[in-house]
Amino acid sequence: GENVEQHPSTLSVQEGDSAVIKCTYSDSASNYFPWYKQELGKGPQLIIDIRSNVGEKKDQRIAVTLNKTAKHFSLHITETQPEDSAVYFCAPTSDSGGGADGLTFGKGTHLIIQP
Amino acid sequence: EPEVTQTPSHQVTQMGQEVILRCVPISNHLYFYWYRQILGQKVEFLVSFYNNEISEKSEIFDDQFSVERPDGSNFTLKIRSTKLEDSAMYFCASNRDRPNTEAFFGQGTRLTVV
């Protein structure tokens, strides 16, 4: 099965600064790379995803970069705001199995935005 | 905006009792999932359901767990004889048309076994 590592486990940045969270995975068949944000008391919510035929994807202040050779992908948040404070999970996935496999989440990164 | 709804939001049960957690996935979605999250830990996959049957299940999903889609809208998770270690947040999720697309999660049910 997929072995997923996320770093750092906690990240504290000043409001307005950038934050980067890295996710490494083991399954070379992984071809879908989402990032989920979980706010306190809520379920995870997809914020950005990328597929293995693309190296980078950007959506306003959020971007994801993928290095398939090194088997890692990263979440980049620029101009951080207080509402970015949350736990972020990566969940690299392969659909090669053909079944409706569930997501294998990383352990999460607690992002704290200091005012 | 369509959303996944879960009831109850919090359930307290005695050890050994049966509990049923309920979910209403988004209406045109085809893939359904249960996940659990022990306090402060990562979200863990339990089971996936497609075409009215279990598609995949994890090691956590043992014989005390079962899922059902009794009608066209509800999706339930039953835990037959709860243990203290079943205390967790349980999330229901659904995908529209294939697994490797956005999964929409409900707000979760906090299960406390005492």
Image (spheres, coloured by chain):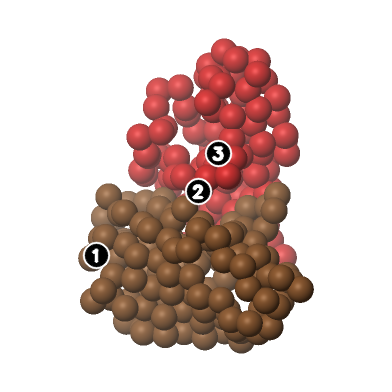
Q: What residue is rendered at 70% in x and 49% in y?
A: A41
Tell which subunit mark 1 falls on.
A
Q: What residue is rendered at 47% in x and 29% in y?
A: B66
Q: Judge depth for marks 1 and 2 and give the one in front.
A: 2
Q: What residue is rendered at 47% in x and 27% in y?
A: B65
- Above-or-below relation of A75 to A94: below
Residue B15 visible at all:
yes
Q: Nearer the viewer, residue A3 or A20?
A: A20
Cβ atoms at labels 3 and 2 below 8 Å apart? no
Label 3 to label 1, Cα distance in Å?
28 Å
Residue B26 visible at all:
no
Question: How far across and how far down the image is residue B76, in percent?
Answer: 57, 35
The residue singled out by tag 1 in the image is A29
In this structure image, what is the colour of chain B? Answer: red
Give the residue type at disc 2: Lys
Give the residue type at disc 1: Ala
- Which residue is most to the top? B16
Tell which subunit mark 2 falls on.
B
Cβ atoms at labels 1 and 2 below 8 Å apart? no
The residue singled out by tag 3 in the image is B38
> Could you tell me which secondary element the residue under label 2 belongs to?
loop
Figure quadrant of residue B75: top right
Give the chain letter for brown. Answer: A
> Could you tell me which secondary element the residue under label 3 belongs to?
loop
> Could you tell me which secondary element the residue under label 1 belongs to?
loop
Question: How far across and how far down the image is residue B100, in percent?
Answer: 41, 64
- Which residue is most to the right? A115
Question: How far across and how far down the image is residue B56, in percent?
Answer: 36, 43
The residue singled out by tag 2 in the image is B42
